[in-house]
Amino acid sequence: MSTSTLTDNLSDRINALAESATIGMAKKARELGAQGISVINLSFGEPDFQTPQYIKDAAKKAIDDGFTFYTPVPGIPDLRKSIVDKLKKDNKLDYKPENIVVSTGAKQSIANALLCLVNPGDEVIVYAPYWVSYSELVTLAGGVSVLIDGGIENDFKATIEQLKAAITPKTKVIMFSSPCNPTGSVFTAQELSDIADVVAANENIFVIADEIYEYINFGEKHVSIASFPKIKERVVTVNGYSKGFAMTGWRVGYMAAEKYIADACDKLQGQVTSGTCSIAQKAAVVAYSDLTETYKMTEAFLRRRNLCYDLLKDIPGVKVNLPKGAFYFFIDISSFFGKKDEAGNVINTAEELSMVILNDAHVSTVTGEAFGADKYIRMSFAASDENLIKALTNIKATLAKLK
């Protein structure tokens, strides 16, 4: 039986989905590693720090206390209460525990929200460049992604005029991240206020705001779009612990929303995964009690950003902005299209250039095509100073060979 016949047996739903590009590139990097080639991995969106000790200690205590049974689907009460307290203190958002749904990572929270809000044919306006899973999750929900592209000349932030022009009678959701993956852009309070004005004028539109990089912010204080009262009831705020607390493997994310939306996500999650890991939840309970290590990590990311920015500006042909948050550079490499590698192969796409960089410079990046921007590659600076300097030195040498 041929491969095409075998895949025809799968659902249209899964055949329509693309593999995560970040996971796909990491897989290729591991293949080179298996051949004895050392690859500097700048493709994963993962802090290179250890989870703070006080969080680990809380997990160990939970194990010793025998906290190893099923939990309520939307999260244990003390975790939901800690999230409520955090949202009130840091984001000026008043919620009750009943408005919080804890999930197995922020990705599941986004999926829950889309599956509970979007009907087949509904349009979801996605600020581009966007995190790789956004458009695929919209597809999974049966919706249609409508991209509004903010280009590097506008710090990758689509204008309010673009947003207004994209709205149709079929628009159901507006979705974005701030700080943004993959660009590091951060919406200002005024920019969020302008978006809120547009949403307020369109009473059937919801907002899914991904704030997972909230603490990795190098500029003005983070602002949540749900803090604008006129649209709060139509905003789903998504956050979690993976980035700010180096807890990627713990898989704890959450959403805050109106009770009927939270109840819907609770019902959906109850049929898919139920509550996330009991031990991870107990660890997360204490996370917001001490941000000392979080701020130290952010300081390190800021230093690395400045280091990489100086090195990137020194590479002929690349164009970069200065990220205001997160830990990525989104690099315009379109000047290399049409050039040939040492084997004489013409480079026509970001995917092809990222593979040249992987095979020659031994650095893994991610093609911008996965983020809705086909002239870019994404590079994480969540790595040691030594590896970042070596990686960018290697990339500079590789690009210089292209003719």
Image: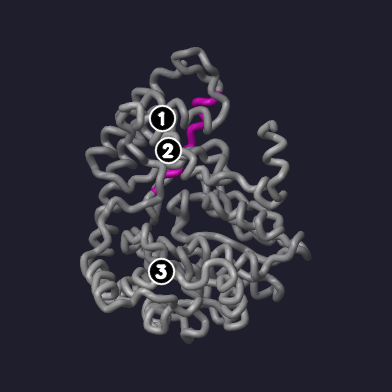
Question: Is the N terminus in the top left, top right, bottom left or bottom right quadrant?
Answer: top right
Please tell me whether residue 331 is drawn above or below residue 291 in the rendered image.
above
Label 3 to label 2: alpha-carbon separation: 31 Å
Measured from the top left, where is residue 96 in percent x and y? 48, 86
- Tell me which residue sits at (51%, 85%) in the image: 98
Q: Is residue 196 left or right of residue 242?
A: right
- Tell me which residue sits at (78%, 65%) in the image: 169
Q: Secondary structure at mark 3?
A: loop
Q: Are marks 1 and 2 in contact (CB under 8 Å)?
A: yes
Tally of marks: 3
Q: Secondary structure at mark 1?
A: helix
Please tell me whether residue 197 is drawn above or below residue 380 in the rendered image.
below
Query: Can residue 62 be seen from the camera position used here?
Result: yes
Specify the amino acid type for callout 1: Leu
Could you say which disc has been placed on residue 365 in the image? 2
Specify the amino acid type for callout 2: Thr
Q: Which residues are magenta?
A: 328-337
Label 1 to label 3: alpha-carbon separation: 36 Å
Could you say which disc has been placed on residue 358 in the image? 1
Query: Which circle's residue, 3 or 2, is located before the other in the chain?
Result: 3
Measured from the top left, where is residue 215 in percent x and y? 35, 64
**Image quadrant where residue 52 sits:** bottom left
